[in-house]
Amino acid sequence: MNTIAKAVKFGAVGAPPCPPASAPVVEVRNLVKRFGSLAAVNNVSLTLEAGKTLVLLGESGSGKTTVLRCVAGLENASSGTILLGGAVVDDGERTVPPESRRIGMVFQSYALWPQMTAVENVQFAGIREQKGSAARAAARGQADQLLESVGLATMKDRLPSQLSGGQQQRVALARALAGDVRLLLMDEPLSALDQALREELRLGLRAQIRNSGLACLYVTHDQEEALAMADELIVMRSGVIEERGDPRAIYERPATSFGAGFLGAKNVVRGKVVKAGAPLCVAEVAGEKISFSPVDSLAVGEEVELRWRREHMRFTESADPVNRWPARLTSAVYLGHRWEVGLKCLGVGMRAWNESEISGVVSVQVPPMLVLGYALRKSSSGSPADTS
């Protein structure tokens, strides 16, 4: 390929070749990003279609923001390929600059220009590389419309310092939508806000993204935010994809023990399978029999890790013996709409929720289908291959 052809393909001269009409907005193939000897992202592949929101969920250091920054062009891939609209923008050797990728980005800190009013922030982003009074007028008209769409028409002449955190977040969203963008990138856009405001804004943000009709790649460490925003969810861990799929399916039945723990199934015990089968198996834990739903294929005698959510523990006086155990109260915290209760049960500490205050020794019960069982197989080093 000659120099001019390479430049056109990678956006340095003119535009990339016209992609197929059915091409995804984003396609990442076997992406690796190294910082020195550390592989922050290791062999990650994903696709994102127009009108959909793909959420990357993970703890700090999982690689989720690095993936987003590579898609944005703020980091260059060490290897692998990134395509936007079917055109290669990074192949590990050559890369299209961020300003040529037709993306809008909302940063965690919003990064509004402090000397510009709300409408000037949005207008300036809308102009991009266009010149002349006609371009400025068109960008101003679009800015006015975008600020109206996010409910800030009456505040468009205010500086960022004169706006609340939630209002700044909406200006940042309007700015990301300005111009001819095809992809929204959102890096923890609500994490700088207090909890009440986060809860208030996330549903409105979801509606605004959907109304735009654009594809959105969204990064967060907050599981509730991820579930509220995602059409598809990817859970990341140590630079790799732990699991992906429908958000509700992943939440209700995570494929891995790590995913279950990260998504809230933090009550955990270990034991041995004494009865294998479907839909339920039985394990022995601390002298008690526990019926559970196996996620992995299990055999009698195999070690198993059992997980369930605190909201699935019920305080009961039922005579039904299945998955009913004595527990001793160790703490109780009043949260207004419920109590969070600490328990010693089956020899380990656990957490549960209850509507009223309790004390002393109690009986707790968990429905068998809500107890998830994961094979506790050993790695080559002899340690558990997947624990949280």
Image (cartoon, rainbow, N blue to C red):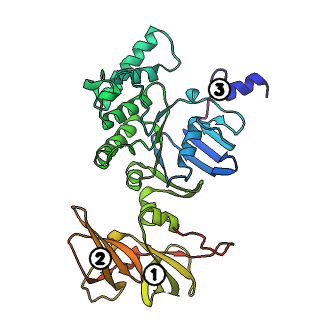
| Residue sticking out furthest to the front | 330
Which residue is depicted at the point 34% across and 43% down? 193
- First of labels 3, 1 by sequence position: 3
Q: Amino acid at mark 2?
A: Arg
SS for dot 3? loop
Q: Nearer the viewer, residue 48 or 108?
A: 108
In this image, 301 relative to 187: left or right? right
Foreground tag (2 vs 1):
2
**Mark 3 or mark 2: which comes first in sequence?**
3
Dot 2 falls on a residue whose secondary structure is strand
Which element is circle 1 on? loop
**Disc sitting over residue 297 in the figure:** none
Boundaries of the magenta span: 15-21
Label 3 close to label 1 by CB (< 8 Å) = no
Taking the spot 65% from the left edge, 26% from the top edge, the residue there is 11
Looking at the image, the residue that sits furthest to the right is 2
Whole-angstrom CA distance, mark 3 to mark 1, is 56 Å
| Residue 280 - label | 1
Residue occupying image coordinates x 31% and y 30%:
149
- What separation in Å lies between label 2 and label 1 (alpha carbons)? 20 Å
**Label placed on residue 314:** 2
Foreground of the two, 86 or 333: 333
Question: Is 232 in the magenta?
Answer: no
Task: Give the overall secondary structure of the magenta segment.
Answer: loop
Question: Which of the 4 image quadrants contains residue 288?
Answer: bottom left
For mark 3, what is the residue?
11
Tell me if residue 155 comes above or below residue 253 in the rendering. above
